[in-house]
Image (tube, rainbow, N blue to C red):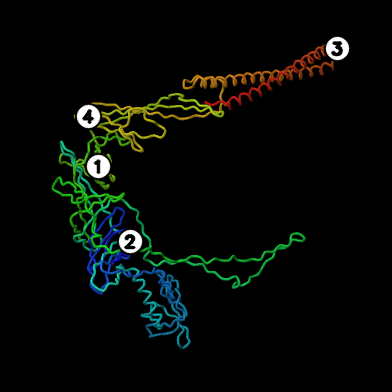
Amino acid sequence: MTRLVLSAIILAAGLAAADLPVKQVVLYKNGVGYFERAGEVAAGETARLQFKASEMNDVLKSLTVEDRAGKVVALRYDSSEPVDQRLREFPFQLGARQPLAMFLDDLKGARLELKTPSGAVAGAIVGGRVAMGSEQRPEQQIVTLLADSGELQSFDLAAVSGLRLADARLQGQLKEYLEVLEQARSKEKKTVTIESAAGGARRVAASYMVPTPVWKSSYRLIFRAAEDPTIEGWAIVNNTSGEDWSQIQLALVSGRPTSFVSKLYEPAYRDRPTVELPEDRVQGPVLYEGATSAGVAGGVPGGAPGGVIGGILGAARSKALRDAAPMAALAPAPMLMRAEAASSIAAVAEARELGDLFEYRFSSPVTVRKGESAMLPFVQQKIHARKLLVYSEGQGQNPMNAAEITNSTGKTLDGGPITIFETGAYSGEALMETLKAGDKRLIGYAVDLGTRIGTIQGSETQGIREIHLRRGTLTLREAVRETKTYTVRNVDQKAKTLYVEHPVRPGYKVLSPTPAESTPTRHRFELALAPASTAKLAVVEENTYEVAHAVTDLSPDTLLIYARNKSLTETARAQMEKIAAARKAIAENDRAIARTEKELQELNQDQGRLRQNIISLNQVAGQQEQVQRYARDLAAQETKMAAMRDRLSQLRKTKEEATAALDTLIDNMEF
């Protein structure tokens, strides 16, 4: 006994093969289903499976065949060449809405027989055309023939009652062309034939994946007084396969394994390059450029690059042969646990882990007629859940009635809608994501009109928390603290538990109170509400951030302010004060330089005034004494200015030395 594997994975749906009836169906959440078929095949017969054309890609990717008494030697199936590829082989093409005259124009030279009001006419087609219409006459389709007499005759096709291509081969090609178009529109099934080497009767089994509707989950959460609530789960299954599922083994898998469509059914073609040898090319004219200088001539003949023939079209099909095994190897996996039955409906599905997936397998055979759907209970048992309120800012002033569900069933609960009942009455609806065993979820199912919530936002700056100096950059870590106060009014005469969902903000840390739990986007704080009371929840958060300054850009006073920060050590404070003192000395030196430069500028201006006065007095008789006095003043100022220039030079030198010393000091400091 040998098993032939053509590949694995894909979708579910129907097929019709009377000799191999459906025995097992496994439905997945990704739009595929796994089917198992098995049946007796008489001596000399082949096993036959039929599929929809749309299923063939998935069948060829996943089909597995087992012949218990023989060896599978071949699988044959109806091929499907693309219609465009098949039509390309014909000597004519029928375009969309193509006029008959233009079709006949493509058949120039073919012999055509026409039935006209004046009798039968025959001749070779010269051409066809469409004459545009006008207000006086409609559009005309005209064909021109070369009659046997040698006369050219034109005919309006609207007046022709019939025409026929005299060439039987061409007429047959037209008929075949139309058959190809008809086949492309057909919905016929494709047959897969299984051939074996055995001559006697044998049992053949086949399994595969094909597209199917996704199975869906629907839940009821039932709260009863003084006991744990009950969860009841129903699976909705649709049979669109085109045949009955009669007494089959059915399993439902929660999870979404990867699935895709690979085009294996339609033949694949590749466009290949057209190449030729260089010596086969016809030599064209060569243009040479004119010379631009003596001894240098330009000229590059034109040419074409060579080509490389590439692309190998092939297909590799992996196959695995395994030793014969009894048919029990294809039977469903053993059932591991039994769901509790707590009411008038019985959940008959057994659950088990399938790696990262989870399977519900119905222990009793299931029947679903073609074109019908079924609701099958797959879980019914007690579950840990408590009722509370959930408030998220932005949903209004009222919180939601919610249930906190902890999956204590030991099974994965597939995602789906859930309806809540309390004390026998409908309370609301919610959506539940897929819930793994032991995981927890909140589901909100109604607005609580008996509770109102308001918020107030406040903030305060917390000052500098840390100061660091490195490589001349002073980094300050500062903080701002924000408080959001939730005021909750419970107007009902019963105690409640409230979850406040506070948004998670990047950079902010919750200082108080401690969240009951957190999600990637929300902190949840639990608040107990007494009957007919008001309660407050103050959420305090802090955001710390860094600000960097170049030390050389800070004034000495600013440095001294930072040096007094209580976060600094004594060593760091002494370093900061040393830098501040050096910056202060440099600043005082800068002020001395500025004063000296200003005094020099004023003396220069005064000298200019004295010189102008001397020039003016020299032109007046009897003013020599005054001129001599001005000259003495100029000499005294020159002496003073020389001393000031020496002082200014010294101040500038002192600044350079102090600045260099400060730079060295800053570069070597780090805390």
In front of the other: label 4 or label 3? 4
Q: Which residue is mark 4?
A: 491
**Tag 3: Cα neighbours inside 10 Å, few (<14), some, or many (≥20)?**
few
Q: Amino acid at mark 4?
A: Val
Q: CA distance from mark 4 to mark 2?
A: 62 Å
Q: Which residue is mark 1?
A: 407
Q: Locate the N terminus and report the quarter of the image it occupies.
A: bottom left
- The mark lying in front, picked from 3 and 2, is 2
From the image, tell me which residue sits under label 3: 622
Provide residue 130's location: percent of width, then percent of height: 44, 73
- The mark nearer the N terminus, 4 or 1, is 1
x, y percentage for residue 449?
Answer: 23, 34
Task: Look at the numbered disc 3 and give the secondary structure of its residue.
Answer: loop
Instruction: Tell me where residue 205 appears, x and y as whole percent.
Output: 26, 64
First along the sequence among labels 2 and 1 = 2
- Give the mark toward the camera: 4 or 1: 1
Task: Name the mark on residue 62.
Answer: 2
